Amino acid sequence: MKRDGRDKIRLLALDVDGTLTDGRLYIGNEGELCKTFDVKDGCGICDILPRYGIRTAVITARKSLIVEERCRELSITDVLQGCRDKTAGIRALAGKYGYKPDNSGVYREIAYMGDDLLDIACMAMCAVSACPADAAGAVRLQAARVCENAGGQGAVREFIEWLVENRSVEA
């Protein structure tokens, strides 16, 4: 396996809107009505990552009961909503799990996937970063991996499969 840092990843942190979803917000008179999630992404989170000892966390600038419910379905317990300073979220997660940054300020145990400007700083502070195919241009330039799939259309699953490629399943 090419030594690109994937083998050290213990936590995958994900943005929601535009990454786990297609980025569309359906809002009615009573507030947010729905978001669409791809079941293949969910399968990757629930069925693939745990076999490799990788946790999943969500960091999102918005607050949503829909996100809370989806994370509960996927057994994601680290859910940081209303977090516009996502780097603070990364540092909090790193502290919770005892991860320390290296001399360049990078957390070698954390991978990050996002699609928009608020995600760029997190991508820079994580060992491995990715974005969906339809991410903002500046994000695509920052990402170590630009997925072929769009947000909410299997991009997270694609990144998960790449992340664990050639990695041994934990006993």
Image (spheres, rainbow, N blue to C red):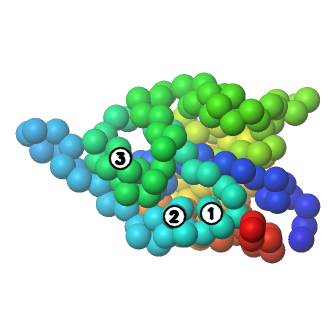
Q: Which residue is mark 1?
A: 49
Which residue is pictured at 75% across the width and 66% down the height? 170
Residue 46, label in figure: 2
Contact between marks 2 and 3 (CB within 8 A): the answer is: no
User: What kind of residue is marked 1?
Assistant: Leu
Residue 146, image x and y in percent?
Answer: 65, 61
Give the percent coordinates (x, y) of residue 92: 62, 28
33 relative to 48, above or below: above
Distance CA(mark 2)–CA(mark 3): 16 Å
Tell me which label, 1 or 3, sits earlier in the chain.
1
Residue found farthest to the left: 29
Q: Under tag 3, what secondary structure?
A: helix
- Within-10-Å neighbours for mark 1: few <14, some 14–19, many 20+: many
Circle 3: residue type: Val
Q: Position of residue 140 (x, y in %)?
A: 64, 52
Q: Which residue is mark 3?
A: 67
